[in-house]
Image (cartoon, rainbow, N blue to C red):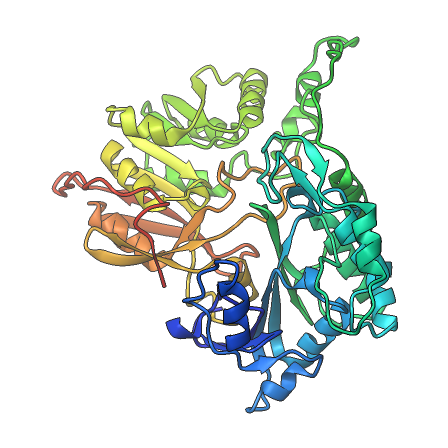
Amino acid sequence: MGKNGRGIEIGASYSPILPKAEGYKTLVVDHADADGLRSKYAAIGVDVSRLETVDAIDDGGEFRQLDLTGEGFDFIVASHVFEHLTDPVHFLQRCERALKPGGRVYLLIPDRRYTFDYLRPSCTAGHLLAAYMAGQKRHGTAAMFDHHASHGTRGGVQVWLEGFKGEYAFAGTPQAGYAMATRQGDDYVDCHAWVFTPSSFRLAMADLHAAGVLGLREEQFYPTVGCEFFAVMSAKPATHGPDRLALALDAINEAGPEHIAAAVVDPPVYIGSAPSAQNAIDAFKGQWVTAFPAAQGLQAGTSHLHEDPRILWLAEKLDGWLNGKQVLELGPLEAAHTATLLSQGAGSVVAIEANRDAFLRCLVAKEILGLRDATFRLGNFVPFLESETKHWPLIVASGVLYHMTDPLHVLDLLADRTDRLFLWTHVVDDNAMPTDDRRRAALGAPEQRDWHGRTVTLYPRPYGPLGASTFCGGMDRVPCWIHRDDLLWGLAKLGFDDLAIAHETPDNEHGPSLSILARRSPKATHKKPRPLPTAKKGLKRV
């Protein structure tokens, strides 16, 4: 969002996401004024030092009344607010009316699978519609009962992370639920009225938009981290949401209990037909990304990565130098680039793949294509480069840098291990991505790092939902992208004094991309870099 945009943060309370004190042009809307919030939270021992002035108390009025410019707001942020609303549909309608064209609503919502709402069923578009049609100003009987009757714990705690083990238990009772649901009085009593898993929320929003009740719909969605998921909504997103049936089925799956290892081992699978290359491919049916060369007559993936123009360009630029050389390839995926390197003269290729299933598919491809000069190793290439002392004639790293949490450290390692480096990667590029470029919505808050005397910027770029069996990303859910200018500067700083650039694709749907052949001439010097902190330390948020 940056500090140039104007927006609203709903329910910032004692922990604002976009604090005015740090320069964000944010109006704070809450359920009470600052003094009331300070008294409320101080009484339960919460640190209220970051609590900021409340600009307006939400009484159900129009948010656009807070816009004195008449231009509309760039953003509205609501973190752990949605589940407390009496009428979420009306809330989103108010947000839409307050936004300027292209404005976005950012929602952080608890995932019921990891909170005290676990023992409650997920809400649907019908539940939200009923509250909207009733013009609900207070929480309904059902919400009050469910909140107090079905409040749960796991291992004695109310919030936990994925993988946490512990016995489930009710902390609420039907008697407590009935008492709260039937209490007299008009004063507002809070509760978690709305309970979702990621897919049930996405389905509800999509259904309400399809029905014409909401003008906003999903633009970006980020799966659960910790106990919450993140949704970005806008009036005219460039992207299309996932299939409705797929969301419904995913919501059912998410609502079920955790998978428990089966007591009975599945019987082994035997192939009754004569041995064939297609049988080997079908052992990973539905997982292949790469199409085999047409001459093979085999059915696998759909991406044509054999004889890839990027690798052919690399071989052409090397102008015969590749012949007989040993190559280190990082992230071979399914051995298509491996095969092309060998066909272009490489003497041998050592390829390191961290994805177990991709590694096994590489072995299948090696057998089918007869890649006797290729060696595939399963594991993480970062610790390999940290411990390996071998100097490689050429390192090929196609499609891996933008999956790293610390690309600067990786670049330092690569520079220590070779004088010739091929990269294909996505980058952040201001020329290709102006401030209103929709692809910027996928980027997190930029992080500054000192790298060899220069302040460079890294951009967290979380993966979206990882449901596809062909997903071929990295090991970490939130890798960091590097700016194009910083990447080129860094390669030169690391002693690569000959940079050739090709295949620039500024309009790639995921983000700008390019190929780089970085070479270090004999006269160039490269000083071993000082140790860098890991990506999770020493970060300074912009």
- Locate residue 6 relative to residue 414 in the image: left or right: right
Look at 49% across and 68% down and name the residue there: 1
Task: Find residue 89 and report its horizontal and vertical position in percent.
Answer: 77, 69
- Locate residue 88 relative to residue 460 in the image: left or right: right
Task: Examine the rendering and report whether any part of residue 513 can be seen.
Answer: yes
Q: How many marks?
A: 0
Please tell me in which quadrant of the rendered image residue 290 appears: top right
Task: Say which of 67 and 502 sits in front.
Answer: 67
Look at 64% across and 56% down and name the residue there: 109
State the quadrant of the C terminus: bottom left
Task: Say which of 133 and 294 sits in front.
Answer: 133
- Locate residue 56 relative to residue 384 in the image: left or right: right
Task: Examine the rendering and report whether any part of residue 243 can be seen.
Answer: no
Please tell me in which quadrant of the rendered image residue 521 appears: top left
Task: Say which of 187 and 142 sits in front.
Answer: 187
Task: Say which of 197 and 349 sits in front.
Answer: 197
Look at 69% across and 49% down and name the residue there: 198
- Locate residue 21 relative to residue 133 in the image: left or right: left
Task: Find residue 341 and report its horizontal and vertical position in percent.
Answer: 43, 30
In the depicted structure, whether residue 129 falls above or below residue 186: above
Please tell me in which quadrant of the rendered image residue 438 appears: bottom right
In the depicted structure, whether residue 76 falls above or below residue 469: below
Task: Find residue 257 and report its horizontal and vertical position in percent.
Answer: 74, 33
In the depicted structure, whether residue 448 falls above or below residue 424: below
Task: Find residue 332 and report its horizontal and vertical position in percent.
Answer: 48, 30
